[in-house]
Every structure is written in structure tokens, then in C-alpha cells.
């Protein structure tokens, strides 16, 4: 958010907080017409509403204002008046209404000259409506306020009079009406995001204060996890609205996606908050019901939200169903060219046969081209450009290149660069960046997975050396790695997090044994055993008993979600297959699913971009990282299941089977997707982080 936008937000937030508190919202509900506060409307005028819509405010500025009005449930027609003002200004028709007149828009076309349930229709002086082939401005024949309604809104039905002023005719009328609809969707989406954020706050506040069974209810995981899911949806919807507002004007697709995400976030946030309030949420006295009713009511003004899903599908179909190509750059072209050349079918077949998601020839080519260091600071030979790393991962995942070896090695190397000893920084890191060696992760044990700090693998002092004994589970790529980044316990008597020490142990050290483990995705991982493994002091990373500090750094680097790039690949493969089949892409159930995938894909992308942007600003985006990981992995699971089902019985056919749709890629991804919600911190662990560190809920009873 720019400084100007932040200033606008602060000004309108304090205005609405002061002038539109819940008491005034409630009072407006019983006013006639309902849902309108004329005094508040006059006050809003002093802040420039709706005039500023045509006096320099951008669409992005207006979303900021709409979000604040939604947050306060302000009983004034911010969205409709702003959209109408922009339209009249665009068409040079502002003079058709007297100064200060309240003009609204009928967002659904009129039928037989009647625009029904027009938002703000009960208080407007004039309405813009699509009447057949004409877009008109009508002043006459307003019906009575329609009451009662779900959210006590000033709705009324208007009959379009013969005196209505034509604003546009034919194709131009329809194009303008589409634009009105898009702007209304965008600003209503912003208002719904504001509503959702406040509804969530009400739920969090209540869950923090309310006690049951002797503890705050916000410490129950069932409550925490539901609110964490909602917080993630709301964050994603807010980012999509922001992106759509700044996208080029033609992006109806981005607006439709943002609107769908916002309608869902608002419904879910208000519903979850109501539920968290228990019986009290059902009492009229509690404010959450005000939010709950409007979360459903505002989108219903446009019609069944499911129709919007169908509309998004139409828009996607017009664009060929897949996201546009990323912006070209010299770096992307170089990476794409090299990956196309080096990631051959033989490489992918080798991965399939061995289960080892790494290929040395590809890896060395990436290193030789300097790509492995691309996202690293210049001191390490990198380009100091965080975007370069994103491009690299994007291009690798796009073709399904084997990247597990690079993933673990890079995160350990980054950790060593920050907290490693001289030898580790001077020798190991450069060898990683040169593509000479891999490093695997030795965290998980038979009895400590999510609770990784409960590791029991022992490291004991023996003279100047350390002697290590224990067992690690899921040591992926141990059979290819030169080192294992090994979490050990050095003080069994200290509190769990304090008695740990990290080591970087050469895999060739005597006493290490590797046993393969085969998984659901046919990928290979390993169990590693450590029997009297002797290493020198130089193998230690960080302080003795300071292993958790090292882990904290390493875990931050591990939450780099590649699942969205995988989802992009699945979608492209699916569409590639579907376009060769008769009528698949015409089936409404398929189109609906593709619309859902599209919303998930862009929401996950936005969350990932937010995390990356914060990292680039030098922040440690713990909560944003958890949201991106949680959302993207679960989106991948949902989408793979939905798209596999479309294949019907042919979805059974796996790689290598004759006629397997998309060469069995969807079947393979369906299996693979499951692990993305487990490794690098399960979904439940991410929800806990979001709930406690993001929402500030009390620590869960474990
Ligand atoms: C293919 C694969 C590769 C892997 N690669 C590596 C690797 O290279 N190195 C490595 O060290 N590890 C690796 N892992 C291990 C992975 O990180 C762990 O599987 C993961 O952290 C979960 O631990 P766990 O399997 O012991 O499950 P558990 O921790 O026992 O969890 C079981 C279930 O309980 C839930 N649960 C646990 N704690 C809580 C809680 N506090 N609140 C709510 N629910 C909870 C979990 O979400 C999960 O659903 C890999 C795993 C797989 C499957």
C-alpha cells in the first residue's frame, strides 16, 4: 500500500469509526427507508463522497474507501454512488443530474422497463439502468422501499419512464453496463473484505475473552483452526481485490475472481465469527449478526453468486483457460531455454524410475549458468534480485523438473550463510551454489515429527569430538547428499527447545546407514541410522544447545511454497488434454471446477507474492509464509482431486498406461499433492502459527 493510500485509509477508518458506530448502523435499520442514514451521507459529502470518484481518486483509492465503509457497515451507498459518478463523468452526462443528487446503479438489467430491487434505489434521486439496448438515466417512478429484507437495505424497484435520458445505445450500452458491473463488483468486493476483516476481529476478540472449561475458548484448536482458515481466505481476498484494482482496465477476469474470493471470505468470516460467539452470536444484541446478514445480502443484490462462477468460466474460456504468460524478461528466457534443453524426457523418466527427485546433469547445468545463485546476494555471486529466484522456481516447476535436491540444499546453505561457521560459509556454501553437492535434512524422527524439537538423536562430547547416535525418519535425498543437516539433543535435562544442537555431518562419516522408504507418490525418501558417528567441532552449526535458534532460521527458508507453480502446471496439463476432447470444456460442471481452480491459483499466487515482498523488505514473514503454505498446499489437493474426477474412469490410468490422459500427470499429481500438506510443517501446524502469531489467540492446550 502506498503512503497516499494508507493516509486515505486512515482518514476514512477514523471517520467511519467515529460517525458510523454499531449503534448508528442499528438505528438506520429501523429508519424509513431502512439502511440509510441521511445525516451520515451529508457528513460523507464533506469528505468528498462521491465527488472524489471523479476528482482524481483512482479505482485503487476507491477500493480503500469501500473497504473502510464495509468494515463499518456504513449505512450509506458508497459503492453505488461512486460507480454512478464515474459512469456519468465518463459519458459526459454529469450535467444531467442536479449538483448533490444521489445517483445509483441498477446492477441487474431492467426487465420490461422495470429495474427491481435497485441498491440504494429507495433513497436515490436517479438511477442508471440497462433497459434493453439502451443504457439510461431515469429520474422517475420510484417504488416504495422494499421491506423487510435480509440486511435492512434501502432497496426499491424503479420503473423506467419515457423521459429517461439515453446514455448509450446498442453495443456501447452493453459495454458500459459491463464496466459498471465490473466496478461495482470490485468495490463491493472491497467492502466485503472490510466486512470480513471486522467480523473476524469480533470473533477473535470474543474467543480471547470468553472462557469455558477454565480456559479461553480461543485456546481450543477447533476454534483456532477455523479462524486461521478464515483469516487466510480474507487475506487472499484482500490481495486479489488490491491486484484487480491496479490491473489494467480490461481485466474483468481479475475483478470477477476477486469478487468471488471476497464473497466467499465474507460469508465464511461472518459465519465463523457468529459460530465462535456460541448462543450469544444468535442474540440480536451482539454485533456479529449485523455482519452475518450483510455478508450474504450485499452479493445477492447482483444475483446468485454461482452465476458469477459461470461468468468467470466464460471469461477464462475467452482467454484460453490458462493464466497469461508471465512478463518476459531476459533472465526468464535464459532459464526457460536451458530448462527446455536440460530437462529432457529421459531426465523425467529417470526420476520416475528411481523415485529420486533430483538429476545431477540438470542441476550442474543450472549451476554452471549461475542460476542456482540467482536469488542470492551479490557477495555470494548472486544477482541480489529476489524475483530471479521466483522466476527460476517458476520455470522449473512449470515443466515438472526434479528440484528436491536444490530445495533442501538451498535452504541449508542460506542458513549456513547466516549462522554457519567459517568453514561452512567458506567451503560448503560455495560448493552448494556451484552445484557440486547436496545437503539433506535430518530433523524428523520416529517419535518427533511436527514436534520436531522433541528430537532424541543424541550428540555427546568425547574429547574434542562429538559422537552421535540415533535415527531419523524421512531423510529425503540422503542417498545423494554430501551432508546431512542434523538436529540432535545435547542436553537431555534442559527444557525441550534448549537442549538441542545442530550439526552439518558429512554423509561419508562411518556409522551412517541409509534405508530407502517408498511413498504414495512413488518418490523415494529414507530412514537414516547413526551409530557412534564421530564428528569434529567444525561440524557444529551455531551454539551448543542453541540448535533451536538455527532451526528457526532454517524453517523460515523452508516455507517457500512451490505448490502454486505445481498447480499452474496441473491446470495447463489438464487444459492441454481437455482441448483435445470433444465437449469436455463445454460441460458446466467442468467449467465450474476450472473457475474454482483459477480463484485458488491466483489467491495462492497473491499470498506467495505477499510473503516474498515482505521478505524482500527484510521482514521475517512468518504468518504470511504459513498462510501461503497452508492455502497453496490445500488448493493443490482440492484442485487435483477436482480435475482428476473430470477424467472419469480414464483418470485411473497412470503414467506409462496407453492412452493415459495428460500422460498420467493428473493421476501422479493427485497422489503427490497430499504430501505438500504434510512436509515442511503440516496444515495443522500452519493453522496454529496463523492463529497464535497472526491473530494473537491464546496459546493452544497441546
Ligand atoms: C515424502 C516426505 C518427505 C519428507 N522429507 C523430510 C526430510 O527431508 N527431512 C525431514 O526431517 N523430514 C522430512 N519429512 C517429514 C515431515 O516433515 C513430517 O512428516 C511432518 O513434519 C509431520 O510429522 P509426522 O509425519 O511425524 O506426523 P505427526 O507430527 O505425527 O502428525 C500426524 C498428524 O497429527 C497432526 N498434528 C501433529 N501435531 C499437531 C498439533 N500440535 N496440533 C494439531 N494437529 C497436530 C498433524 O498435522 C498430522 O495430521 C518428509 C515427509 C514426507 C512424507
Image (tube, rainbow, N blue to C red):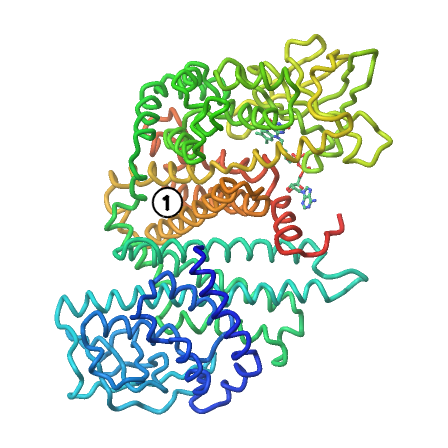
| Coordinates of residue 505 in the picture (x, y in percent) | 67, 16
Left or right for 172, reference 324? left
Q: In the displayed image of the protein, which residue is found farthest to the left?
A: 170
400 relative to 90 in the view: left or right: right
Q: In the picture shown, does residue 691 fall above or below 266? A: above
**Residue 552 falls in image quadrant:** top right
Nearer to us in this view, 101 or 351 = 101
Q: Nearer the viewer, residue 698 or 685?
A: 698
Is residue 94 rendered to the left or right of residue 361?
A: left
In which of the image's four quarters is ligand 1 placed?
Answer: top right
Horizontal side of 165 relative to 443 (left or right) equals left
Disc 1 residue: CB within 8 Å of ligand 1: no
Q: Residues within 10 Å of mark 1 (few under 14, many from 20)?
A: some
Can residue 148 be seen in this snapshot?
Answer: no
Q: Which residue is rendered at x = 18% and y = 72% of the image? A: 91
Above-or-below relation of 323 to 508 = below
Residue 210 is at least partly visible in this image: yes
Expressed as whole percent of the image width and height from the top left, the position of residue 93 reads: 19, 77
Residue 171 figure quarter: bottom left
On the image, the x and y values in percent for residue 517 come to 60, 22
Label 1: which residue? 646
Amino acid at each position: 500500500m502506498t503512503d497516499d493510500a494508507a493516509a486515505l485509509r486512515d482518514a476514512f477508518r477514523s471517520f467511519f469509526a467515529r460517525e458510523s458506530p454499531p449503534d448508528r448502523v442499528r438505528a438506520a435499520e429501523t429508519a424509513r427507508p431502512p439502511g440509510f442514514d441521511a445525516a451520515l451521507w451529508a457528513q460523507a459529502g464533506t469528505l468528498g463522497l462521491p465527488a472524489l470518484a471523479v476528482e482524481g481518486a483512482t479505482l485503487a483509492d476507491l477500493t480503500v474507501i469501500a473497504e473502510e465503509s464495509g468494515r463499518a457497515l456504513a449505512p450509506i451507498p458508497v459503492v453505488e454512488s461512486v460507480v454512478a459518478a464515474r459512469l456519468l463523468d465518463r459519458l459526459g452526462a454529469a450535467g444531467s443530474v442536479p449538483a448533490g443528487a444521489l445517483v445509483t446503479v441498477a446492477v441487474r438489467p431492467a426487465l420490461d422497463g422495470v429495474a427491481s430491487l435497485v441498491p440504494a434505489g429507495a433513497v436515490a434521486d436517479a438511477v442508471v439502468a440497462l433497459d434493453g439496448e439502451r443504457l439510461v438515466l431515469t429520474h422517475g417512478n420510484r417504488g416504495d422501499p422494499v421491506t423487510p429484507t435480509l440486511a435492512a437495505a434501502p432497496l426499491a424497484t424503479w420503473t423506467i419512464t419515457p423521459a429517461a435520458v439515453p446514455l448509450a445505445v446498442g453495443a456501447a450500452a452493453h459495454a458500459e453496463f459491463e464496466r459498471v458491473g465490473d466496478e461495482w463488483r470490485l468495490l463491493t468486493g472491497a467492502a466485503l473484505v472490510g466486512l470480513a476483516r471486522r467480523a473476524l476481529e469480533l470473533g477473535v476478540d470474543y474467543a480471547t475473552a470468553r472462557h469455558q472449561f477454565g480456559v479461553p475458548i480461543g485456546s481450543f484448536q477447533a476454534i483456532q483452526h477455523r479462524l486461521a482458515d478464515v483469516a487466510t481466505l480474507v487475506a487472499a481476498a484482500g490481495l486479489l481485490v488490491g491486484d484487480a484494482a491496479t490491473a489494467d482496465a480490461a481485466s474483468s477476469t481479475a475483478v470477477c475472481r476477486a469478487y468471488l474470493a471476497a464473497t466467499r471470505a465474507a460469508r465464511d468470516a461472518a459465519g465463523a465469527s457468529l459460530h465462535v460467539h456460541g448462543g450469544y452470536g444468535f442474540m440480536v444484541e451482539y454485533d456479529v449478526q449485523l455482519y452475518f446478514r450483510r455478508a450474504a445480502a450485499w452479493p445477492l443484490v447482483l444475483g446468485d453468486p454461482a452465476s458469477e462462477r459461470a461468468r468467470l468460466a466464460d471469461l477464462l474460456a475467452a482467454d484460453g483457460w490458462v493464466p497469461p504468460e508471465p512478463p518476459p524478461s531476459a533472465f526468464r528466457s535464459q532459464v526457460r531455454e536451458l530448462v527446455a534443453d536440460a530437462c529432457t524426457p529421459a531426465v523425467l523418466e529417470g526420476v520416475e524410475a528411481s523415485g529420486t527427485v533430483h538429476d545431477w546433469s540438470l542441476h550442474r547445468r543450472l549451476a554452471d549458468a549461475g542460476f542456482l545463485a540467482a536469488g542470492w546476494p551479490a557477495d555470494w555471486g548472486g544477482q541480489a534480485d529476489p524475483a530471479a529466484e521466483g522466476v527460476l522456481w517458476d520455470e522449473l516447476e512449470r515443466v515438472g523438473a526434479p528440484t528436491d535436491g536444490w530445495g533442501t540444499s538451498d535452504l541449508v546453505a542460506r542458513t549456513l550463510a547466516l549462522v554457519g561457521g567459517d568453514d561452512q560459509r567458506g567451503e560448503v556454501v560455495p560448493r552448494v551454489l556451484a552445484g557440486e553437492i547436496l545437503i539433506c535434512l535430518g530433523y524428523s524422527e520416529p517419535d518427533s515429527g511436527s514436534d520436531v524439537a522433541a528430537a532424541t538423536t543424541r550428540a555427546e562430547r568425547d574429547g574434542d569430538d562429538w559422537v552421535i547416535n540415533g535415527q531419523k525418519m524421512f531423510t529425503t535425498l540422503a542417498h545423494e547428499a554430501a551432508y546431512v543437516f542434523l538436529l540432535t539433543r545435547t542436553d537431555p535435562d534442559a527444557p525441550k527447545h534448549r537442549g538441542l544442537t545442530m550439526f552439518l555431518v558429512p554423509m561419508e562419516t562411518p556409522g551412517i546407514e541409509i534405508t530407502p522408504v517408498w511413498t504414495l507418490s512413488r518418490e523415494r525418501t529414507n530412514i537414516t541410522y547413526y551409530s557412534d558417528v564421530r564428528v569434529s567441532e567444525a561440524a557444529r552449526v551455531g551454539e551448543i544447545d542453541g540448535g533451536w535458534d538455527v532451526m528457526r532460521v532454517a524453517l523460515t527458508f523452508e516455507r517457500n511454497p512451490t505448490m502454486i507453480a505445481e498447480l499452474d502446471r496441473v491446470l495447463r496439463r489438464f487444459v492441454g488434454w481437455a482441448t483435445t476432447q470433444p465437449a469436455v470444456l463445454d460441460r458446466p460442471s467442468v467449467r465450474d471446477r476450472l473457475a474454482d481452480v483459477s480463484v485458488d491459483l491466483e489467491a495462492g499466487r497473491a499470498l506467495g507474492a505477499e510473503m516474498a515482498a515482505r521478505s524482500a523488505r527484510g521482514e521475517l514473514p512468518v504468518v504470511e509464509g504459513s498462510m501461503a503454505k497452508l492455502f497453496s498446499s490445500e488448493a493443490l489437493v482440492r484442485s487435483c482431486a477436482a480435475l482428476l474426477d473430470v477424467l472419469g474412469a480414464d483418470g485411473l490410468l497412470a503414467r506409462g498406461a496407453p492412452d493415459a490422459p495428460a500422460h498420467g500427470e493428473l493421476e501422479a499429481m493427485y497422489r503427490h499433492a497430499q504430501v505438500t500438506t504434510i512436509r515442511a510443517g503440516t496444515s495443522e501446524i500452519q493453522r496454529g502459527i496463523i492463529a497464535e502469531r497472526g491473530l494473537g489467540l491464546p496459546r493452544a492446550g497441546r
